[in-house]
Amino acid sequence: MKKLTSKGLLALLPMVIAMPLAAATWEIDSVHSSAQFSVRHMMVSNIRGEFGKVTGTVEFDGKDLETIRVEATIDATTIDTREADRDKHLRSADFFDVEHHPTLSFKSKKAEPLSDGHFSLMGDLTIRGVTREVVLEVEGPTPSIKDPWGNVRRGVSATTRINRQDFGLKWNGVLEAGGVLVGDEVSINIDIEMILVTPES
């Protein structure tokens, strides 16, 4: 076997430098993460709610947005609008049908820079077994910090809007004075706190 000379090492150096870093893996901290939503009620106000359990992983090399990979799952059974009867209705087959579709999921496909500290994240959102492409506007990620227990953490916030009809959430009621009981456009706000699991290499 030939020994690699210093000249050969120098020739390999540009190739080594050009090799992409392996992305670090981050785990979503469900205790400190949430997904909130708001929707028009009776054409006059916004009803707000949230899902209490968000889990998943994020891969990112810390520099190149093209390395970002996100897979997240939301527990649909944890929906909370601060009104028990309404929450029960939202879990029913009229809306999320949690008996047959207990989770919502998101899987990213592409990230593109926007303004400083913001980027768009395109991916597939699945609700009630129906998958549609959505675009999230993301703020972050924040700089890494170390918590009192030695864990490295980062955070991001994201927003998007969807039409619930596109995902099969079609139930509605017609008001006597005109209009409908529930609006179709849903605003979504997501706050994610992540814990480093596997450092970049």
Image (cartoon, rainbow, N blue to C red):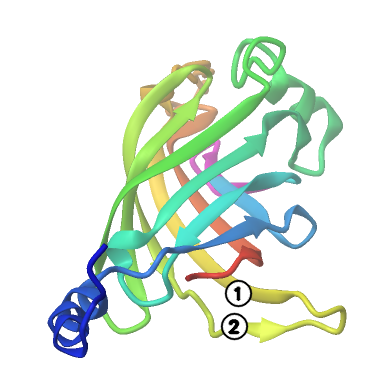
- The disc placed on residue 144 is 2
> Is 154 in front, or is 64?
64
Point 62% across, 50% down: residue: 35
> Is 15 in front, or is 82?
15
Decide: few, some or many residues near mark 1? Use Cα within 10 Å; few <14, some 14-19, many ≥20.
Answer: some
* Contact check, label 1 and label 2, Cβ < 8 Å: yes
- Residue 175 place in picture, x, y as percent: 52, 23
Q: Which amino acid does label 1 sit on?
A: Arg
Drawn side of residue 16 relative to residue 25, left or right: left
Q: Which amino acid does label 2 sit on?
A: Ser
| Mark 1 residue element | strand
Point 49% across, 40% down: residue: 43
Q: Quadrant of the N terminus?
A: bottom left
Q: Check the image and report above or below for 102 versus 110.
A: above
Inspect the magenta stretch and tell me whether residue 44 lies in it.
Answer: yes
Locate residue 94: give its quadrant: top right
Locate residue 124: give its quadrant: top left
Name the main secondary structure of what is drawn in magenta: strand
Drawn side of residue 105 relative to residue 113, left or right: right
Query: What is the magenta range?
Result: 39-50
> Is 10 in front, or is 15?
10
Point 49% across, 20% down: residue: 169
Point 48% across, 74% down: residue: 141
- Residue 128 place in picture, x, y as percent: 53, 19
- Residue 196 place in picture, x, y as percent: 64, 67
Inspect the magenta stretch and tell me whether residue 144 lies in it.
Answer: no
Circle 1 residue: 154
| Mark 2 residue element | loop
